[in-house]
Image (cartoon, coloured by chain):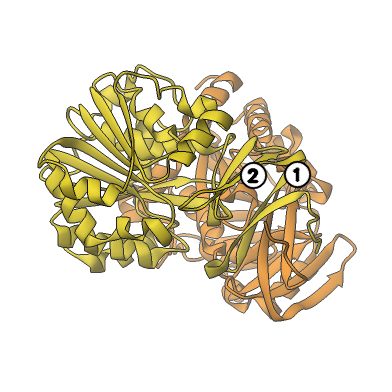
Chain colours: A yellow, B orange
Amino acid sequence: MRKLDENWFTEVAAEAGSAFSLRLTAAGRIHEERTPYQLIEVYETEHFGRLLTIDGFVMLTERDNFLYHEMMSHPALYTHPAPRRVLIIGGGDCGTLREVLRHPEVESARQVEIDERVTRVSERFFPQLCEANSDPRAHLEFGDGIRFVKEAPAAGFDVIIVDSTDPIGPAAGLFSQAFYADCLRALDANGILVAQSESPLLHQKLLLSMHTALRGAGFLDIAVLNFPQPVYPSGWWSATMACKDAPLTGFREEDAREKPFPTRYYNAGIHTASMAAPEFLYQALAGTGPA
Amino acid sequence: MRKLDENWFTEVAAEAGSAFSLRLTAAGRIHEERTPYQLIEVYETEHFGRLLTIDGFVMLTERDNFLYHEMMSHPALYTHPAPRRVLIIGGGDCGTLREVLRHPEVESARQVEIDERVTRVSERFFPQLCEANSDPRAHLEFGDGIRFVKEAPAAGFDVIIVDSTDPIGPAAGLFSQAFYADCLRALDANGILVAQSESPLLHQKLLLSMHTALRGAGFLDIAVLNFPQPVYPSGWWSATMACKDAPLTGFREEDAREKPFPTRYYNAGIHTASMAAPEFLYQALAGTGPA
């Protein structure tokens, strides 16, 4: 049993009694700032490249953020028949936005992040994630995503991506039935919502409550996308995808097979595979409403 | 950034510059013994139940070992048309053996573990993993698995499961082409080999070298099974499955759907899903031989 010295960044997942650590280079912490919303820090790690944290929680590393960002965008965009108008709530590091804009069908990607500093820090320390920020289809706004959706015109978006932090602090409202109901209204008939939904192993209760809230808000069909995310607690993460009127079986598989852009994790096979429910989750979700 | 006190067990994955920790209860370490082969320890953790380590590396916890044990057994057994004779190399904690013996078709499951103490410690501290040890179909032997396979009669097994520790120390030979060639000989015509193959993210080189060695040994078809395993480095693990003469497409899906035993992770959908190759792995494996 060894103890880690001060050359490590450690995040404790108190609810799981587990911790994950990354070894830092001699540079250590290369940025730190307290915004009106949160504490943003950037570290240089030995094997995972740069690390972005908010309030001490890992947001992303250079090495493995492709898993999360690809799975937050491509499954939803290849399920919608014609995703032209995309809204991202949160997503300040701009990695999801970059993936969204790889789809040539997308005419407009609007991002509403509450803390402009997250985006500015990303532009400075994670420029590769922000390389699509200057795309003319990208519209970056900084403000309250919950209010934005509440005030958005009806049926104005094809896909809404909730790329939020954990359901505590400023992001808590992004997991509520009232917010989902506003999203439903803001989505067009074939509209799809996808939201990060924590670890299937550690946060099953949250997953179930999201299902209940999405059904309560009126979404027709719901699916959990499973994917590995080594730097998040348990290394196993999920996104929950829900559709307004069309069932989630509309995967444009041919298009995904011939996607005109490179990916590192996502492909058509992974798309389908990510929706397979582990037995324990299948049984737990069976209790949340009609299949 | 916080430091962990002495109430945590920590495993460092030096090659990844990462570490994983579990918080211990007041009981802390409840067993420790040095065998001729290795150091075996058992801890009581706060949220993951009991923890078994060998030489300081996490082997399993009560909470999440079902992922690994189910994926090391059921995909191979539901791919073989009639798995009657199973050989397990390693597997001293007996969790894989228990899963194998859930299949009524299995007539004999022989396990060859080099260190009898691993099994004795498991019987004492993880009795639920050992509940099939007294099954009359179970044959526990303690000795060198490499020599056992070399001296085994030809075509004597339907499925061989290599449930080993990492490819260092006593287990290194279990990742060699010579060992795989002996396995091939010991397998019947429809025979299937499955071996734990580390993290797709962190140990891609090992995965590729296993592919090359399996092809070199004469295996016809190879597939990687991906699954989450929170307590192993990166939280993302794999098994590599290879077949002697029949292609790996022979999944008995109907049988898996109607499996006469409970599981917590594995089901027919997960079986198929686990074989989907992430784009980076698909591209890397394309270089190791004919598809």
Quarter of the image with the N terminus of chain A in it: bottom right
Tell me what residue is drawn at x 74 percent, y 36 percent: B176
Amino acid found under the numbered disc labelled 2: Glu
Counting other residues with Cα less than 10 Å from the Cα at mark 2, is it few (<14), some (14-19), or many (20 or more)?
many
Q: Position of residue B18 (x, y in %)?
A: 69, 48
Instruction: Give the mark, 1 or 2, whose residue is nearer the N terminus.
Output: 1
Residue occupied by mark 2:
B198
Q: Which residue is mark 1?
A: B167
Q: Dot 1: few (<14), some (14–19), or many (≥20) neighbours within 10 Å?
A: some
Residue furthest to the bottom in view is: B27
Quarter the C terminus of chain A occupies: bottom left
Is B14 situated above or below B11?
Answer: above
x%, y% of residue B135? 57, 74
Counting from the top left corner in percent of width and height, residue B15 is at: 75, 41
- Distance of label 1 from label 2 (alpha carbons): 9 Å
In the rendered image, the vertical position of residue A105 relative to residue B38, given as above or below: above
Q: Are the residues tagged 1 and 2 within 8 Å (C-beta)?
A: yes
Quadrant of residue A101 in the image? Answer: top left
Of residue A114 and residue A36, the one placed in the foreground of this image is A36
Residue flagged by tag 1: what amino acid is it? Pro
Along the line of sight, the residue nearer the viewer: A55 or B165: A55
Chain bearing mark 2: B
Residue A110, image x, y percentages = 28, 33
> Residue at horizontal 33%, vertical 46%?
A275
Residue closest to the eye, B70 or B31: B31
Q: Is residue A119 visible?
A: yes
| In the rendered image, residues at marks 1 and 2 fall on the same chain | yes
Protein chain holding label 1: B
Residue at 36% x, 64% y is A206
